[in-house]
Image (tube, coloured by chain):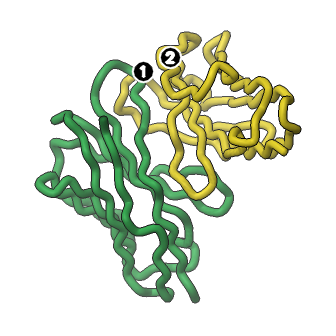
Chain colours: A green, B yellow
Amino acid sequence: AQKVTQAQTEISVVEKEDVTLDCVYETRDTTYYLFWYKQPPSGELVFLIRRNSFDEQNEISGRYSWNFQKSTSSFNFTITASQVVDSAVYFCALIEIKAAGNKLTFGGGTRVLVKP
Amino acid sequence: GAGVSQSPRYKVAKRGQDVALRCDPISGHVSLFWYQQALGQGPEFLTYFQNEAQLDKSGLPSDRFFAERPEGSVSTLKIQRTQQEDSAVYLCASSLRDYSTDTQYFGPGTRLTVL
């Protein structure tokens, strides 16, 4: 069965520091999708990125960047020059390709606290 | 455009009461999911609908949990004879098609507290 592990439960940084969130996954499938979601204090999960298992190209979106390493089953997320508004819980998640309607399997989340 | 909405946002129930949680998905979205998020943990899958058909209910923790989506849009998650261990945030998500890889968009959740 698939599994997602986020070993860091909480990270505290000072504004403008960079922060990297680790995500390690387990799956038997060769085709799968990985996601990152942000959960601010309001509680709603906000979609950040989706990446398929065949695309190992790293991606940058503004201050966010993602490093996908299939060889180590990792999909790490970096926030550059962090801001107070980045304070939230971040979840990594996995979908295996099977029949329609697959469930997201989430990691336990990493709480990021950015201090001014 | 409107996102996924859920109501109520907060629900307090006495142990043994029945509760009903509502989800309004994004208009036109075929797929609808329910997840349960315990305090300090990641969401866990409960059930999945493709239009009005419930295709996967493998995550429902007991037969006290029941979900429906009779007209393929609004969905209701019902919990009968609530127990304290049912206290959690219940999240609803929808995606445009019935493709397993489509991005799921989440609502704000309903926080259920069972006393």
Residue at 77%, 23% in the rendered image: B80
- Residue B46, percent from left and from top: 55, 30
Q: Which residue is mark 1?
A: B98
Q: Which residue is mark 2?
A: B50
Q: Which mark is residue A28?
A: none
Answer left or right for B28 relative to A101.
right
- Residue B6, percent from left and from top: 72, 37
- Residue A116, percent from left and from top: 58, 89
Where is B112 relative to A42, above or below?
Answer: above
* Residue B105 visible: yes
Where is A57 relative to B78, above or below?
Answer: below
Quadrant where the C terminus of chain B sits is top right
Q: CA distance from mark 2 to mark 1?
A: 6 Å
* Residue B74 visible: no
Residue A60 in which image quadrant: bottom left
Q: Observer-nearest residue: A77 or A23? A: A23
Residue at 56%, 23% in the rendered image: B28
> Of the residues shown, which amino acid type is indicated by label 2?
Gln
Structural crowding at the residue carrying mark 2, measured as other residues with C-alpha within 10 Å and reported as few (<14), some (14–19) or many (≥20):
many
Q: Observer-nearest residue: B60 or B47? A: B60
Numbered disc 2: secondary structure: strand
Marks 2 & 1, CB-CB < 8 Å contact: yes
Residue at 83%, 42% in the rendered image: B11
How many numbered markers are drawn? 2
Disc 2: host chain? B
- Residue B99, percent from left and from top: 37, 24
Where is B22 relative to B11, above or below?
Answer: above
Answer left or right for A40 relative to B80.
left
Q: Observer-nearest residue: B34 or B52? A: B34
Structural crowding at the residue carrying mark 1, measured as other residues with C-alpha within 10 Å and reported as few (<14), some (14–19) or many (≥20):
some
